Each structure stands twice: as structure tokens, then as C-alpha cells.
Amino acid sequence: MNYSELSKKIHGPVYSILTPFTEGDAIDWLALENYLTGAYNEGARNFFLMGYNSRFSQLSWEEIKLLSQFVVQKVKSLDPNNICIVADPLHCSTKVTIDFCQHAQSIGADVISLIVREKFYSNDQMVSHFRMVSEESAIPILVHEMPFLNGFGGPVVNYDLDLLDQLADMEHVVAIKEDAKDDEYSALVINKIKDRVSIVISGGGKRQWLRFADMGCQSWLNGIGVFRPYLAANFYKAYQKGDMDYCNRLIEDIEVPFFENGVKKYSWHLTIKAAMQQQGWFHRRDRMPLKELSEADYNTVSKVIESLPLKKYENY
């Protein structure tokens, strides 16, 4: 397996996959299949089944495996060249992470995203975790880098740059999801490891990615591209052609009002589920204890989306 070549394939928009639920609280497989097909038809090529957006906290570990297998099979049936990233549970032991890595490899996933929500005590603790995983599975790894829970109490702790340096040197590590949401820190991370792994920036949308793209940040985790995938696909096409006027207009016309009038008021997770329903992909419902927006709040989000000039950016 050529880990370096795979890393180079992860660039541009990365599409996180939301998990839809039926009225009876089951995973809505048909709606999910239709969404994956629709997203592909609108230009999605990098698919990411991830812990938070994909609702892993609401799923059993067996459901996570079933969901992963379903998504990989569908994404690869659409085009074997699509990149499909799956993930381990949000909070588990290294042994469980290894089990999920081996499962991901067996179902044909390209990459597995690994998150560590156990309390952080030392860099050696984390290096040992990722080294053990790499010794037991050959699947390429995306490190979901978000602030650790502090084992000594107090505020959360960012990944130490020396730790990221060590992880980026590991053969199996092909990408980092930079999820600290701290621009100064993000710049340091990009400068430190951009030559070895693909960096997927998260939070802040396309505006944030443009700030870091020229520094060497290859990818971003989609925001508005989740509910209308062609927005991200066309944005990236324009960026590659140097059409910054198109890119900036799309940001001002679509991204800014969606986040300012929707996400800031109702949060990302509830607003994006409402947007999925408004655009006809699937119902906004979630499993408890996460409760979807009320009908009144959903109608407010719907009006925000109805006001967006989506058709204007349908083609590029």
C-alpha cells in the first residue's frame, strides 16, 4: 500500500456524512443511500463517516460497523476511485480502536479516522496508542486532532506540535483533521506537518480554508456542501482555476448568511440536520438525548435557506 500516494488524493472538499433516522428510531438506510448517490452526482468524491456529524454517540458499536460497511460499499459502487474515510468510536480503549481498524480494512475503507477522548497525560501515551494501532492493522490513519481532555484537570489541551510531528512521521498516518478551531494554532500545525500528510481543516467553512490554503492546507471539512454538495464542488473548481471572484461571492451569498442566521442561533448539529430536511434529503430527526429543532425553529431555518441563491451556483 502506498500511503504517500493516498495522502495526496485527499484534497479539496471532504464531505462528512450525517446519519438519518426513521420515525421508529432505526437508521434510515434508504435515505442514506439516496443521499450518497445524490452527493456523488453533485460532485462529492471524498466521503467521511465521522464520530460527531455521523452521530456515533447515538449508535451502538455494532451499528457503527454496519453503517461503515454500508457507506463503504455504496461509495465504492458509485466509483472505486472515491475516497471513503470511516472512524472508530468517540470514546474507547486502544483494543477497541484496533478492532475497528481491522474491520475498516476488511470492508475496503481507504482510511480510518481515529479520535482519542481519553484523558491526556503525556505525548508518550498518545504515541504508544497510535503505534499499537499501526502494528495491528495496515489501514491508513487520519488523526482526528481536537483538544484533549486534560488528565490533570483544567482546560482542554491542544496536541503538542512535537506530538503531531511524531505522528506525521508514522508510515500509516496519511492525514490530520485539524479541529482545534484556533487560527494561530492551526497555522503552526500546517507549517509543521504539511509536507508529510494531508490536512483537513475543520470549523469556519470555506472562509477559513482560504486563509490556510496558500500555506499548504490541502482540504476542508464541508459546511454548506453537506446540504448542497455542488456548492463545495464548484467552489473548489473555481479555486483551482484562480476564479476568486466566484469563490468570494459564493461565500458571501451562501455560507455567511447560513452560518450567521442559522448556525449561530441553533448550533451546527441541529441546523445542518434541519437543512437536510429542507433540501429534501431526509428528516431532521435524531435519537435522544439529541433532540431535533422544533417545528417553529425548523421553519425559521427553512426560510433562511429559501432566501439563499442556491441555483445561482448550481453549475460552474
Image (cartoon, helix red, strand yellow):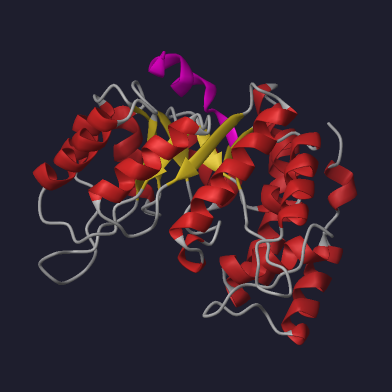
Quarter of the rendering occupied by the N terminus: top left
Q: Is residue 129 left or right of residue 56?
A: left
Task: Find out whether residue 62 is within the magenta segment.
Answer: no
Which stretch did the figure color magenta? 1-13
Q: Position of residue 307 (x, y in %)?
A: 85, 64
Q: Position of residue 125 (x, y in %)?
A: 12, 47
Q: Position of residue 22 (x, y in %)?
A: 72, 68
The image quadrant that residue 279 belongs to is bottom right
127 and 227: which is toward the camera: 127
Residue 143, compared with residue 241, is above or below; it is below
131 and 304: which is toward the camera: 131
Q: Position of residue 195 (x, y in %)?
A: 35, 21
Task: Find out whether residue 10 is within the magenta segment.
Answer: yes
Quarter of the rendering occupied by the C terminus: top right
Q: How many marks?
A: 0
Who's the residue at 72% across and 82% down the image? Answer: 297
Who's the residue at 68% across and 54% down the image? Answer: 255
- Is any atom of residue 203 visible in this view? no
Q: Is residue 246 left or right of residue 126?
A: right
Who's the residue at 41% across and 42% down the image? Answer: 113
- Is any atom of residue 252 visible in this view? yes
Q: Is residue 1 left or right of residue 296?
A: left
Who's the residue at 37% across and 26% down the image? Answer: 197
Residue 290, compared with residue 118, is above or below; it is below
